[in-house]
Amino acid sequence: MHRPLGVTIIACLCLLSGVYLCSVATTMLLVPDVLTTVRAAPFVPALKSLSPYPTLVVGIAWAVIGWGLFQLRDWARFVATLLLGAGAAWELSMLVFRAHSSWRILAACLEITLRASVIWYLLRPPILDVFRAKHSESSFPRTPLQRQ
């Protein structure tokens, strides 16, 4: 089955974020003091306050979701939709209940918009059909009579 370009892009982004989070978590585990020198990297200030173990688990989860999207697995589409929705809801609650600078408000609105766009894309009927067609191909092996 042909994988749509949008699904490939989303899978790449999931895989990249998983690799990024896993590498940061591994760095936190192996060389804990190095994060104080890497202040310019994205999300490092927030990750410094967390334990590396949940960061590693989340990184592995995003990498597995990215792999599942590459394989057109319906479970990966479903889980990605749930996690992106939860992330958008969390960002919206942080936006409403905390005071932020104007650039942070703009970044949060952009993040919510991007997450909602990806959710909308993954729930479109043509994309659902691609995932379901892949699922039906792999679920039922063909008998020798059907192959002819």
Image: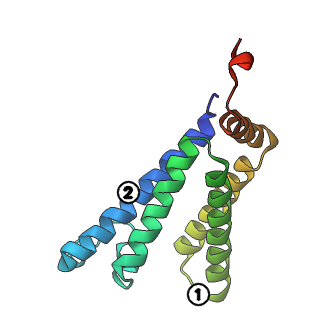
Which amino acid lies under the numbered mark 1 shown in the image of this protein?
Answer: Ala
Q: Residue at x 62, y 66 (%)?
A: 83
Q: Quadrant of the N terminus?
A: top right
Image-based side of 80 in relation to 24, left or right? right
Q: Residue at x 67, y 49 (%)?
A: 74
In the structure shown, which secondary structural element does the residue marked by tag 1 occupy? loop
| Rendered view: 24 above or below 9 | below
Q: Is residue 21 visible?
A: yes
Residue 25: x %, y % from top left: 32, 71
User: How many circles with numbers are drawn on the protein?
Assistant: 2
**Tag of residue 58:** none
Image depth: mark 1 or mark 2 in front: 2
Q: Residue at x 63, y 77 (%)?
A: 90
Residue 19: x %, y % from top left: 38, 57
Q: Is disc 1 surrounded by few (<14), some (14 to 19) or many (20+) residues within 10 Å?
A: few
Q: Is residue 10 visible?
A: no
Q: Quadrant of the C terminus?
A: top right
Quarter of the image where one finds residue 45: bottom left
Residue 129: x %, y % from top left: 77, 38
Q: What is the C-alpha distance between the residues marked 1 and 2?
A: 31 Å
| Rendered view: 119 above or below 22 | above
Image-based side of 41 in relation to 6, left or right? left
Q: Camera-side residue: 61 or 32? A: 61
Quarter of the image where one finds residue 84: bottom right
Name of the residue lying farthest toward the top: 148
Quarter of the image where one finds residue 102: bottom right
In the structure shown, which secondary structural element does the residue marked by tag 2 occupy? helix
- Residue matched to label 1: 99
